[in-house]
Image (tube, rainbow, N blue to C red):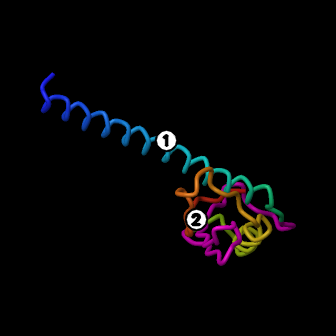
Amino acid sequence: YSEGVKKRIAKLTKKMREAERQKQLESLRQAYISAIRAKVQENWRTAAKISDKAQCDLYITQTPSGNVSSVKVENCNRFASPQFKKAAKDAVYRAQPLPLPPEKELFERNIRFVFKP
């Protein structure tokens, strides 16, 4: 092959590797957020009668060690009572420290996910 063809092949190979890496990172990122959601659900407790249709978005701010700095409960559906919102927030704090990402570059200070009991 000529030098130009070799360079184009090398460039395409590099782009393909980068695309595959991004795909892997996105998969790991989804697993990381799922692990956080699961740990929060494991810490879900409430004495109140809660609709199984209740759901809210949880916005969590965390430190690199998985400690929770703040929790916001937003975008709740009509089934989410004030008790549900408080119990969801409490579950996040009980879940500390949150799971760490499988790779440091995946750490996100701000995490958002839909919470359902």
Q: Magenta part of the protein: which range? A: 46-75
Residue at 41% of width from left, 38% of height from top? 20
Checking the image for residue 80, the label placed there is none
Against 49, residue 33 (above or below) is above
The C terminus, quarter of image: bottom right
- Determine whether, in the image, residue 111 is placed left or right of residue 50: left
Q: Viewer-proximal residue, 3 or 23?
A: 3
| Category of crowding for the residue at label 2, using alpha-carbon neighbours closer than 10 angstroms: few (below 14), some (14–19), many (at least 20) | some
Q: Amino acid at mark 1?
A: Gln
Nearer the N terminus, badge 1 or badge 2? 1
Residue behind mark 1: 24
Picture coordinates of residue 37, whole percent (x, y): 67, 56
Q: Secondary structure at mark 1?
A: helix
Tally of numbered discs: 2
Picture coordinates of residue 101, whole percent (x, y): 62, 55
Q: Viewer-proximal residue, 80 or 25?
A: 25
| Tag 1–tag 2 contact (CB < 8 Å) | no
- Determine whether, in the image, residue 3 is placed left or right of residue 72: left
